[in-house]
Image: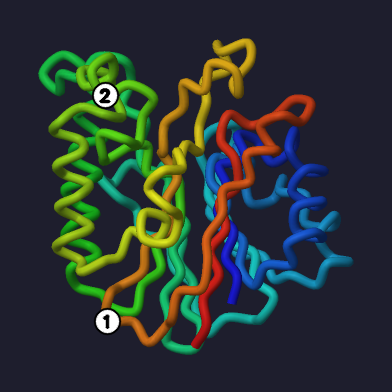
Amino acid sequence: MKIVSWNVNSIRIRKKQLLDLIKKEKPDFVCLQEIKSSNNAFPKDDFKDLNYFLYINGMPSYNGVCILSKNKVDSFYSHDFCNKDDSRHIEVKYKGIRIHSIYVPAGGDVPDASVNKKFEHKLNFLKEMKQYFSTKDNNIIAGDLNIAPYENDVWSHNQLKNVVSHTEIERTKLLDILKNGDFIDTFKLLIPPAENLFTWWSYRSPDFRLNNRGRRLDHIWINKKSSLKLIKAKIIKEYRELQKPSDHVPVVLELSF
C-alpha cells in the first residue's frame, strides 16, 4: 500500500502537478491539505479517468482536506476540531484501518496565545488532537501538522526556536500526541538521520536548494501496534522546483498488510 500526502496550497493551481504525481506514483491513497476549494468546486471530472474515489471536506478559498482512494472505502468522516467549521480533517476507513488527512493551523506569527488568537487556536487544536487519537487505533495520520518537532527538523534550531512551528510548546505538544497515541514517526525511522527531512521551504527563499532553509512540517504516522509493516519513505523535493510550486512537497510512505 502506498500513501501520498501533500499540502497542495490550492487544488486549482496545482491540479496538473497532482495529476502527474498520481500517474507517476500510482498511490493507493492520496491525502491532500489546503485544497482551498469547496466540495462542489473541486475539479472532480479531471480525476475520473484515473479511477479514484474522492472524499472531500472543503471550504471556499481556505483550508480544506481531501482523500483520493483507489478503492471504495467502508466509511468516511470529518471531525470539526475546536468547533471552527474550518475543514481541517477527513478520515476514511478501509479494511479496518483509519486513514486521516489533517491540516493543523499554522498559528500566525507571534508565539504567544495571550495576544495571538491564531496561536491559541493552534494549541487548542493540538490539545483536541491528543484526545481524539487517544480513543482510536489502527490509524494512519497523514498531513501538514505545521510543526517541526525535532531540533534537526529545521535548518537552524537556534534561529528558529522562538519562531512559530518550532517553539518548545508546539514541539512538546506534538510529541505528546505521538507518544500518547503510540505512533511511529515513520520518516524518522525509515530515512537515514544524515539526510535532512525538510518538506517545506518558504516562498521568500529565491533558491530553496542553495539556501536550504527548510522545515519538516509534513508527516505520516502509524500506530505501533498496527498490523501494517513499513517498507520505505521518500520526500519528493523536485516538486518544489516546478513552475508555480506549492511551498510544501509531496511525501510518500509504502507499507504492506
**Residue 56 visible in the displayed image:** no
Amino acid carrying mark 2 in the image:
His
Residue at figure coordinates x 31%, y 29% from the top left: 165
In the rendered view, does 52 fall on the left or right side of 122?
Answer: right
Q: Which mark is residue 157?
A: 2
108 sits left or right of 190 in the view:
left
Answer whether labels 2 and 1 touch (C-beta < 8 Å): no
Which residue reaches farthest right? 49
What colour-coding does the image apply?
Answer: rainbow
Residue at the image point whose x is 46% and y is 43% from the top: 195
Q: Quadrant of residue 136?
A: bottom left
User: How many residues crowd around disc 2 within 10 Å: few (fewer than 14), some, or many (20 or more)?
Assistant: some
- The answer to whether one can see residue 122 in this image is yes
Q: Is residue 66 left or right of residue 230?
A: right
Q: Amino acid at mark 1?
A: Lys
Q: Position of residue 77 (x, y in %)?
A: 44, 68
Residue 129 % position (x, y): 24, 54
Residue at image point 46% right, 27% down: 214
Tell me the residue that label 1 is attached to. 225
5 up-or-down from 115: above or below: below
Badge 1 element:
loop
Mark 2–mark 1 Cα distance, whole angstroms, equals 32 Å
Q: Residue shown at 56%/13% (left/top)? A: 205
